[in-house]
Amino acid sequence: MRLVLMSLLIAGLLFSGSINCQTVNVLKISGTGFEMNGEPFEFTGVSFFNAIYNPEFNRSSEVRREYIRKFNEYGINVLRVWCQWDNSLSFIDSGSGKTLYAADGSLNQAWLERLKQIISDADAENSVILLVLFSRESWNENIRLDNSALEKAVAGMAREFMPYRNLIFQVWNEFNYRTIDFLKIIKSIDRERIVTNSPGYAGDLGSSEESRALDYLSPHTTRDDNRHWELAEAEIVYLLKKYNKPVVDDEPARRGTSKFGGPRSKVFPEDHILHIYNIWKSGAYAVYHHDMFQTGYGSDAIPLSGIPVPGFSSYHDQVFEFLKNKNRYLRLLR
């Protein structure tokens, strides 16, 4: 009888979503900053576009948590992850079927379950997932859902991830098609969900209408080869003053190939460091971006694991070491 009662109790808890559903950490916005569980959260991100589809990262929950702990060691507490990684550009781990969405807007259950596991493991390590719902790269290749399927996909994602409070939705990477419509759908289902958008290519700060509506702003700032670390700071200061909400410089600068919008001339780690420092100094935050996603396995830019943890590039390691010591520099800034 005791075993039966215990089984019924566990079943009831599972049904109510009390076991393995509700994340522990709750991210919120406070003024022009972020809070987790009521304490200041020093948002520091890294691009990890292929996280859902990377075999090594997803070998097991413990493997994932070990990698997330490695990120944490370097001050990185936000992973920027893409749902659509189905382009044909030969990016690492990309390709047909690497998407959460079927043509009718329904969700791929296998990828959905994996994503929930990633978010839960990040939560266990006090980290946040910045989830990009749709990508311009797929759109440009005409890998598109029609309007009704897009709406269905957005609503499905909003419902599925309601229990996960260490999660941010970023509607697009570098695009703004129906952003406000999708924002309204998300908020109608989950009004507490933090929603942002990357509105366009580098230097596109977004429209006033979109910027007023979003919970925080996440543009890709200017990557011009000529002193981008100063131009980007001016862009961020403008957004902070005009909208009085958090601003995250999404993918500041980078070393990447010129084929995919990277710099046309030689760059240095100090370029990134100056850029990020100026963003911090302005009162904003950054998601570090680099070149590993733009080529496939076997390239010098790609670690064997396909995971952008420190240790795969002496160039990027200088930036990672800078991120690791954020508190040293922030003492004079925040």
Image: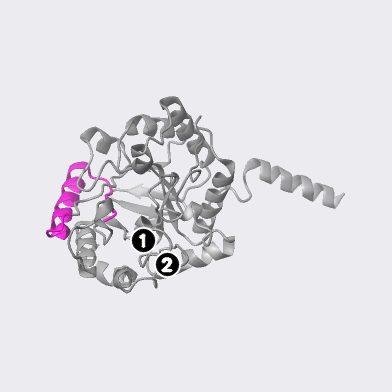
Q: Which residue is at a point 28% across and 41% down the rendered structure image?
A: 199
Residue type pointed to by label 1: Met
x and y, in percent, of residue 164 in the image = 51, 47
SS category of the residue bearing label 1:
helix
Q: Which residues are magenta?
A: 224-252
Q: Which of marks 1 and 2 precedes in the sequence?
A: 1
- Decide which of 69, 199 is in the foreground and name it: 199
The quadrant in which residue 263 appears is bottom left
**Residue 68, placed above or below residue 31:** below
Whole-percent x and y of residue 206?
Answer: 23, 39
Give the class, few, some or many, for how many residues have Cα within 10 Å of label 1's Cα (few <14, many ≥20). Answer: many
Residue 24 in sight here: no
Residue furthest right as drawn: 1
Locate residue 55 relative to residue 314 in the image: left or right: right
Q: Nearer the viewer, residue 89 or 112?
A: 89
Question: Which amino acid, mark 2?
Answer: Pro
Q: Is residue 179 magenta?
A: no
Mark 2 packing: few (<14 Cα in 10 Å), some, or many (20+)?
some
- Left or right, 214 with reference to 124: left
Q: Are marks 2 and 1 in contact (CB under 8 Å)?
A: yes
| Relative to 309, residue 168 above or below | above
Which residue, given by chain and number where applicable, does mark 1 sit on? Answer: 292
Residue in the image at 43% along x and 36% along y: 191
Q: Is residue 70 shown to the viewer in this render?
A: yes
To which residue does mark 2 refer?
303
